[in-house]
Amino acid sequence: MTQETPAALKTDQMFINFGPQHPSTHGVLRIALTVEGEVVIKGDPDVGFLHRGMEKLFEARTYPQALVLTDRLDYTSAMHNNLAYCLAVERLAGIQVPPRAQYIRVLVAELNRIASHLVFFGTFGVDMGAFTPFLYAFREREMILDLFEMLCGGRLLYSYLRIGGVSADLPAGWTEKCREFVNFFKPMLGDYDTLLSGNPIFQSRTKGVGFISAEKAVAWGLSGPALRGSGVNYDVRKADPYCVYDKLNFTVPLGTNGDCFDRYYCRMREMGQSAEIVLQCLDALSGAEPTPGEVIAKGVPKMFKPAAAQAYSHVEASRGDLGFFAVSDGGLNPYRMHVRGPSFINVAILQEILVGCKIADVVAILGSLDIVLGEVDR
Amino acid sequence: MGIVLDNLSKIENLPGGGIALATSDSLINWARTSSVWPLTFGLACCAIEMMAAYASRFDFERMGVFPRPTPRQADVMFVAGTVAKKMADPIIRIYKQMPEPKFVIAMGGCANCGGPFYDSYSVVKGVDKIIPVDVYLPGCPPRPEALMYAVIKLQEKMKKMTVKGGHGATPLQAAGSRKLV
Ligand code: SF4
């Protein structure tokens, strides 16, 4: 995508601050752009405007208290953060999670993936100048939030998953409502295609823009749809299954071209797969097999001291491979908690792919990586 | 004019119609309260709830709340999220770019007092440490309905404003206590 400015049209170089207050940076990212006419010749992402010292705060909280902080990392998919954290602590302390809780965890994680991708779909449309998809996306998202609200009372940040299981079993009538939602949602994916994916203006703004080759994607350590858009088949749910993913039947959508459109479309198809997983979990939960009511491991105390050890667990969050590395020194609080945030690693590639693109494409490329600044800056 | 006449408290209809008398305060405040334009500006998790407030179910626009991407056109700033120390300077700068009269709603625990990050080394414990705040909205995150309530509270405050004494500023501003150092 490198475009040469004809020598006769050479203009002065200009420095532009893109952000930290800009509607299209999805938060407080700043990109320092050097442009020549319309063409970007240098783009440096500047992070840290939302640095909350999260990893240090983990050290000042007990294990169950620290769960609340994990919600606030990637706030559009809080369930995944809860899940990755709980898995790491459970591995550290050797806690077994009852099977019913495992199904519920997968169920809510996939619902949250849909909700998170819907935010992406809506805001990416707004970035590309289409406002209507935003309204559709948020209409469906509100339905998922209603379901979560029934579960735990929270709309955005749930802390529903607990160390050892989940905080409560599914309330009465929840399964039916959830099924109703999935049945309503599946045909909507077709509507989204007619609304946005098939739109010629949208396609010309995203196809062939922000190309990332498979090698480059791997070299920069991308994960999630940003990686799979380039055709690399890596999904933690398949590569290193956790909870009950090995018992579920789903495919991992892949892109071919590695451009903005493919990354976008990967997410759209992932939503369909998530809906299938939700249905499978609902089926599994409706029988008597994973005993109803048994949703949290027995005998996990309010405060506990895992033996001095370290543990790492990762999950496939909405934005990629999210990992927690927990180190215990035998005390009440974690000695160290490191977070491998996919957004933070995905944002780094901007400095390479922004070079040579047009100014208007910066928004498309940034949007297609779908970063959440809470996770980038932590 | 129907809406105007219904909503203005201090208004007199002259016989014969065609002319209505109102105090400039009530007319200006009516206009001001029905077009509260916030800055499109989100910091953290609370910003997602702010977005939800603009979207289908809550439809903020029916209250005249219509987001503007530039501070030059904005009346109110929703500080929706955690104010990190690195972000403090840009926030002051954005605030200064907004035209008078301007208002600030601190949305969420973080903007009020640091919230869950009360003991963090890199978080400003409340946006009121750096800019004046008109409405404090608690919650983590506050629901979109709560944000609407905050706007209603702000409108109530606006209705008490008077143009006497200079520049149509809030009483606080007129007294000079809103001056930024
Ligand atoms: S108050 Fe809560 S939801 Fe709002 S920004 Fe702070 S941590 Fe996030």
Image (cartoon, rainbow, N blue to C red):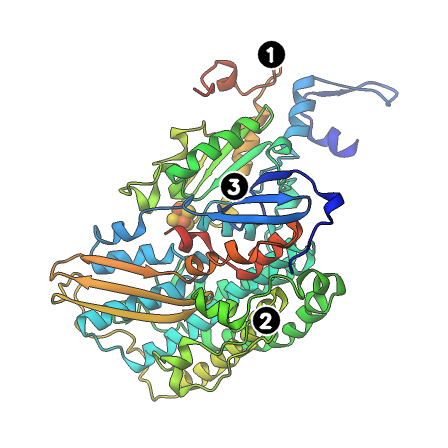
Q: Position of residue B111 (x, y in %)?
A: 41, 39
In front here: B115 or A374?
A374
Secondary structure of the residue carrying tag 3 is helix
In the picture of the structure, the residue carrying the numbered disc 2 is A268
Report the residue at 57% width, 54% height from top.
A354
Q: Position of residue B124 (x, y in %)?
A: 35, 36
Q: Position of residue A286 (x, y in %)?
A: 42, 84
**3 or 1: mark nearer the eye:** 1
In front here: B43 or B152?
B43
Marks 3 and 2 close (CB-CB < 8 Å): no
Position of residue A84 relative to residue B65, above or below, is below
In the picture of the structure, the residue carrying the numbered disc 3 is B149
Q: Is mark 1 within 8 Å of ligand 1?
A: no
Mark 2–mark 1 distance (CA, rounded to whole Å)? 55 Å
Secondary structure of the residue carrying tag 2 is helix
Q: Chain of mark 2?
A: A
Marks 3 and 1 close (CB-CB < 8 Å): no
- Sequence order check: which comes first, mark 3 or mark 1? 3
Position of residue A67 relative to residue A232, above or below, is above
Report the residue at 69% width, 60% height from top.
A205
Report the residue at 23% width, 71% height from top.
A90
In front here: A199 or A104?
A199
In the picture of the structure, the residue carrying the numbered disc 1 is B166
What amino acid is found at the position of numbered circle 3 in the picture? Answer: Tyr
